[in-house]
Image: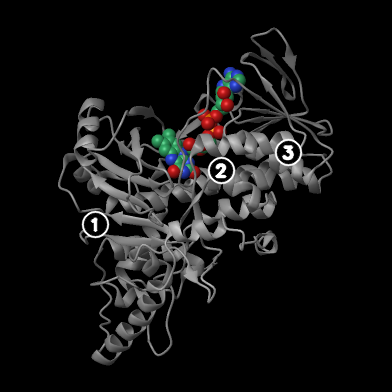
């Protein structure tokens, strides 16, 4: 492949702008162009994130929070509240919850949580009490590094576009109508206007259309439909009218899938993810409206869960929905995009633009591992959810392929939420870690055979620890209170906090 001096990114959604910004930031001499078609537009959904996205934006891209907050208008997310399994609910936070072990207790937290998981750790306790950050003596928030954002896709992309222009990234509007090929892979993109654009490396961020990787290069697609049965979402929302801004995403079991609630400052965003084999669009809409009488207009988004065999083929690197998508249950797409962007930007930086097939091999390993790990983690949500006895959930309990998660589930079945072999049970590219698996299994009250029962002294010690956590969290700030502080004159952002997180 020739020296990479010109990068052409096809697509101006979040994947396209994040890829362009990452490469420009770490290879400043690179000529970076984003090509997008306003008439095709962007997906317009994709609002939940994980802390990886926050670290990437303010660490790897070094975007100043003082510029970001007023324009992108994020709100904070500590995790997900699951209305799932047989408990009324349980919290999955980004902070170690069941994996942690407190002094004077003989086992990790998971062993004390079967009946009651509340206040097992600080983030989960903050979530339960509608608080987002602990309070400093002067009343300002103590920001943690385990916090994610809720972002409105179009507002977020609007911010990224403006930031890209400031970084001297060219943005061209036009629609690709023909892809020209040569022995390197792709030699040019012909636009409707008749112009042909050329580059040394093409980044395919064209969304589900996957114009370059899927369509032009014909890379095979691996469907995840034996694990993830849902293939559509009906999405909508309403303007916030006095409801508190919750510090988490809610994921709630529905007849033929599940629904999300994502918290924006001015708007509540909801979506019902369902399987079209089990419910029609009209029936899903009706169930969604019964659950959410305040809904205004809705629309249906179709998707396919799976990934392309490889993400980097010849001179094309694909990111975002153009290379893979799993349904939104753990809000992982933007996090995968950030990891892929980091992989490509570091490759170009550290190779001085001389890329080899050996780079593509490693990128493709990362691509496969990231998507496959998410698939297996999500499988555990579906296989063990016994909240509703509908035909969809019966099919999930009987048929969902849990693949590589089987080893973790077998270990849990024998040993309970034991942490001894965490490092060998969980793959290094697993976002969720042992804590994530144990939270989902204990949270859904999946039975295990471990005979250990804490005695009265341990139970009393455990309850004492939880009361302390609960009291500490109760004094925290709500999202509204914390937003007011970070917008006030007295607040200044500590940029080193995020820079220190860059590896
Ligand atoms: C129901 C649903 C819910 C989701 N929820 C989440 C979530 O909570 N969290 C999360 O992280 N992710 C979520 N996602 C995924 C998320 O929306 C995307 O991964 C993310 O926004 C990136 O999108 P993208 O940039 O790949 O694609 P898009 O936003 O679709 O952008 C594609 C771009 O390519 C351009 N393009 C395409 N073809 C051409 C052409 N021929 N010529 C010129 N330009 C072209 C378009 O104009 C557009 O600019 C969700 C997805 C779905 C379907």
Q: Residue 85: which disc?
A: 1
Residue 113, image x and y in percent?
Answer: 29, 73
> Which label's residue is closer to the chain start, 1 or 3?
1
Q: Is residue 241 left or right of residue 369?
A: left
Please tell me which residue is depicted at 74% across the width and 48% down the height of the picture: 346
**Residue at the disc numbered 3:** 357
User: Which circle, 3 or 2, is nearer the viewer?
Assistant: 2
Q: Which corner quadrant holds the C terminus?
A: bottom right
Mark 3 element type: helix
State whether residue 188 appears in this view. yes
**Quick one: label 2, few (<14), some, or many (20+) residues within 10 Å?**
some
Q: Is mark 2 within 8 Å of ligand 1?
A: no
Do callouts 3 and 2 mark residues in contact (Cβ within 8 Å)?
no
Please tell me which residue is depicted at 54% across the width and 66% down the height of the picture: 144
Q: Is mark 3 within 8 Å of ligand 1?
A: no
Of all residues shown, which one is farthest toward the top? 194
> Which label's residue is closer to the chain start, 2 or 1?
2
Please tell me which residue is depicted at 32% across the width and 88% down the height of the picture: 461
Mark 2 element type: helix
Q: Is residue 408 left or right of residue 151?
A: left
Q: CA distance from mark 2 to mark 1?
A: 35 Å
Q: Nearer the viewer, residue 19 or 406?
A: 19
190 lies above or below 387: above
Of all residues shown, which one is farthest toward the bottom? 457
Q: Residue 452: which disc?
A: none
State whether residue 324 appears in this view. no
User: Which circle, 2 or 1, is nearer the viewer?
Assistant: 2
Q: Is mark 1 within 8 Å of ligand 1?
A: no
Residue 370, image x and y in percent?
Answer: 53, 48
Q: Residue 72: which disc?
A: 2
Please tell me which residue is depicted at 59% across the width and 27% down the height of the picture: 213
Q: Nearer the viewer, residue 70 or 148?
A: 70
């Amino acid at each position: 492949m020739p020296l990479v001096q010109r990068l052409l990114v096809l697509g101006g959604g979040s994947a396209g702008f994040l890829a362009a910004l990452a490469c420009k930031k770490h290879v400043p001499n690179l000529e970076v162009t984003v090509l997008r078609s306003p008439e095709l537009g962007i997906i317009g959904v994709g609002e939940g994130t994980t802390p990886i996205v926050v670290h990437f934006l303010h660490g790897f891209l070094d975007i100043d929070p003082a510029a970001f907050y007023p324009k992108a208008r994020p709100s904070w997310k500590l995790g997900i509240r699951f209305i799932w399994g047989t408990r009324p609910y349980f919290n999955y936070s980004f902070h170690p919850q069941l994996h942690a072990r407190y002094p004077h207790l003989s086992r990790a937290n998971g062993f004390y949580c079967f009946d009651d998981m509340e206040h097992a750790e600080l983030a989960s306790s903050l979530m339960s009490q509608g608080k987002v950050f602990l309070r400093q003596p002067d009343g300002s928030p103590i920001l943690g590094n385990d916090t994610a954002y809720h972002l409105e896709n179009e507002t977020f992309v609007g911010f990224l576009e403006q930031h890209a222009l400031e970084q001297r990234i060219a943005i061209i509007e036009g629609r690709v109508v023909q892809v020209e090929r040569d022995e390197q892979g792709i030699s040019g993109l012909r636009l409707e206007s008749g112009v042909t654009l050329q580059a040394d490396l093409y980044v395919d961020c064209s969304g589900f259309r996957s114009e370059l990787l899927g369509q032009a290069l014909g890379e095979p697609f691996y469907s995840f439909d034996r694990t993830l049965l849902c293939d559509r979402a009906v999405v909508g929302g309403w303007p916030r009218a006095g409801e508190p801004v919750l510090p988490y995403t809610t994921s709630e079991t529905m007849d033929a899938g599940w629904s999300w609630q994502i918290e924006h400052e001015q708007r509540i965003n909801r979506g019902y993810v369902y399987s079209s084999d089990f419910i029609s669009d009209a029936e899903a809409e009706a169930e969604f409206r019964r659950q959410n009488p305040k809904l205004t207009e809705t629309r249906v988004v179709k998707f396919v869960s799976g990934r392309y065999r490889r993400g980097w083929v010849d001179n094309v690197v694909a990111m975002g929905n153009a290379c893979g998508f799993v349904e939104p249950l753990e809000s992982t797409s933007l996090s995968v995009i950030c990891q892929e962007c980091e992989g490509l930007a570091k490759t170009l930086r550290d190779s001085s633009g001389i890329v080899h097939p050996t780079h593509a091999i490693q990128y493709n390993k990362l691509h496969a591992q990231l998507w496959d790990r998410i698939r297996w983690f999500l499988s555990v949500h579906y296989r063990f959810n016994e909240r509703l006895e509908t035909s969809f959930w019966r099919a999930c309990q009987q048929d969902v392929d849990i693949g590589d998660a089987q080893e973790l589930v077998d270990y849990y079945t024998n040993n309970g939420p034991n942490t001894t072999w965490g490092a060998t049970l969980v793959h290094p590219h697993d976002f969720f870690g042992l804590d994530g698996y144990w939270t989902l299994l204990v949270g859904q009250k999946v039975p295990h055979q471990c005979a250990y029962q804490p005695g009265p002294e341990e139970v009393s010690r455990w309850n004492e620890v939880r009361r302390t956590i609960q009291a500490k969290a109760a004094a925290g700030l709500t999202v509204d209170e914390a937003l007011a502080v970070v917008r006030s004159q007295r607040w200044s952002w500590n940029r080193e906090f995020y820079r220190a997180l860059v590896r």
